[in-house]
Amino acid sequence: MSKIPISLVIITLNEENNIARCIQSVPFADEVIIVDSGSSDKTLEIAESLGAKISFEKWQGFYHQKNKATELAKNDWVLSLDADEALGEDSQNEILDLMSGKLEYDGYIFPRLSFHLGRWIWHGGWYPDKQLRFFNKNKCHWKNTNVHEHVVGENIKLLKKPILHYVFKDLAHQVDTNNRYSGLGTQDLISKNKKFSLFRLVTKPISKFIECYFFKRGILDGMPGFIIAVSASYSIFLKFAKLWEYEKVKVREK
């Protein structure tokens, strides 16, 4: 496939099981930038064999790593994917169609479809999970937040075809991720001077389960939908429990 002026940018840390699929899903990109924070597996070896340019950056958070990768891109138009994501054939063609004409917008949002526990998850709040990932780096930029860093811009269009997201290796990986993101969520609450509330600790997890499983129809995703709803509820519980720990235990110990 002929190359076009798009830079695929990816941040990595020990992604040997994902990186080839991610890079190979964008065969038309004339540049692949990897910003790695210290992989000890075969991630970089695989990436280099597929023509990627490698840059090392000590881990300073998702915003810093992704912003750095975008800055390194030689092209104005950037496609930012996580290593566990890939373009399907339909989303590839959607980008190629855009590039063959006049790009009327500064950035384009994809829906994102996740694969977990043996199936694609269409409900429970997991889809369409809109992500602004294809953008002109001179007109859009990464926004720095503790949780869920994202690209922002003004002249944006929603695309139809999804990014494919191979979200967790297994349930243990999901539990580890929930633990990490709940901690980031707690830090976000602390930075906003939010105080612990027993009421929220009790009610927020319950309402989250009801939201995901019933209102957002996670029940239609079978057992995976139930597991996802419970996991989302527990992640919320951890966020507020860690806020209690910070206020009542860690601050007292200082």
Image (spheres, rainbow, N blue to C red):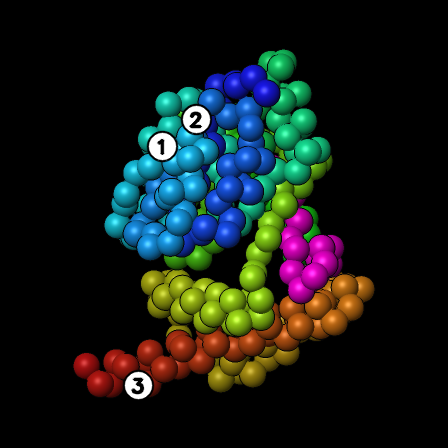
The first of marks 1 and 3 along the sequence is 1
In the foreground, 201 or 148 = 148
The first of marks 2 and 3 along the sequence is 2
The first of marks 2 and 1 along the sequence is 2
Q: Is the residue under label 1 in contact with that under label 2 (CB below 8 Å)? A: yes
Label 1 sits on residue = 53
Q: Secondary structure at mark 1?
A: strand
Does 171 lie within the magenta span? no
What is the magenta range?
109-125
In the foreground, 135 or 27 = 27
Residue 149 on image: x %, y %:
44, 49
Callout 1 environment at 10 Å: few (<14), some (14 to 19), or many (20+)? Answer: some
Amino acid identity at mark 3: Val
At x 34%, y 46%, the residue is 36
At x 71%, y 55%, the residue is 120
- Asked if one can make out residue 48 in the rendered structure from this viewpoint, the answer is yes
- Which of labels 1 and 3 is toward the front? 1
Residue 78 on image: x %, y %:
47, 29
29 to 16, vertically: above or below: above
Residue 31: image tag = 2
Label 3 sits on residue = 249
Amino acid identity at mark 1: Lys
- The quarter holding residue 215 reads bottom right
38 to 159, vertically: above or below: below
Separation of disc 2 and disc 3 at Cα? 49 Å
- The quarter holding residue 73 reads top left
Q: Is residue 57 left or right of residue 218?
A: left
Quadrant of the drawing holding the N terminus = top right
